[in-house]
Amino acid sequence: MKNSAFITGATSGFGRAIAKKLSLEGYKIIALGRREDRLKSLADELGNTHIIACDIRDKDAVFNAVKNLPENFKDIEILVNNAGLALGVDGFNEASLDDFEVMIDTNIKGLIYATKAILPIMKERKSGYILNIGSVAGSWPYAGGNVYGGTKAFVKQLSFNLRNDVRGLNIRVTDIEPGLCKTEFSEVRFKGDKAKADAVYEGTKYLSADDIAQVVLNCISLPKHVNINRLEVMPVTQSWGGLYVLKD
């Protein structure tokens, strides 16, 4: 049995797929998410899984959960900062400030909380791998991407800077940036409007959560002296729209 992999946002999408993939590879799984019923279902399916039912935005809950891990799950080798979301596609002026704050608290603060809580374990072990799930939205702007794209740009830059801070500790850091991928992501973004969510993927071949889980496994499987700094992943059907010039 391998060491533990701590995965946030493990109740669906990338997080659940990554948990399943790493469990098959022999890792013990620590699965964090808000929906306890889904976490229990995942644990029943995988075995050798410790669940943490809490909101990644709850700083005290995250730190207490890490502090009180069962002894046999304290050997955390891998942290996958996956918990994140987008809310709405309105322009900045029309968009909800509450939605902005939820995205900032989840995508930025939640990532900071989990990393800050777990990094001391890796530092003591002088070994570890932090994989942050960013997005192509952190590099490429699009209408309605505003604050969501800003949070993912933060994920990218924090990943780069974190690499400097862990020099000499044998800790790897990778920012994985998926493009168009069909999960519950768009349903959350459109606040449960499944028709709008499905329309995003209509008529095209998109990535799957399993594709991203495989990318995570590929990174982890590389020799330990190899670090992938940043990995942008799009389906073949997705590319760039190019610059736009408004004309009278």
Image (cartoon, rainbow, N blue to C red):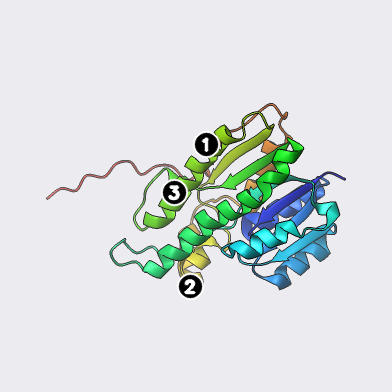
Instruction: Give the number of the mark in front: 1 or 3.
Output: 1
In the drawing, what numbered circle is on residue 193? 2
For the residue pair 216 and 6, the one nearer the viewer reads as 6
Q: Residue at x 34, y 64 (%)?
A: 90
What SS does tag 3 mark?
helix
Residue found at the very far left of the displayed protein:
248
Give left or right: position of 167 versus 22.
left
* Residue drawn 73% across the image and 54% down it: 19
Residue type at tag 2: Asp
- Amino acid identity at mark 3: Ala
Q: Quadrant of the image for the N terminus?
A: top right
Q: Position of residue 243 (x, y in %)?
A: 29, 41
Seen from the viewer's position, the closer of residues 22 and 198 is 22
Q: Which residue matches tag 3?
A: 137
Check disc 1 and report the residue beneath it: 160
Relative vertical location of residue 126 with respect to residue 63 in this rendering, above or below: above
Marks 1 and 3, the one that precedes in the sequence: 3
Determine crowd level at label 3: few under 14, some 14-19, many 20+ residues with C-alpha closer than 10 A.
Answer: many
Q: Nearer the viewer, residue 49 or 209?
A: 49
Farthest residue, direction right: 1
Query: Mark 2 or 3 closer to N-term?
Result: 3
Give the amino acid type for the residue marked by disc 1 in the picture.
Phe
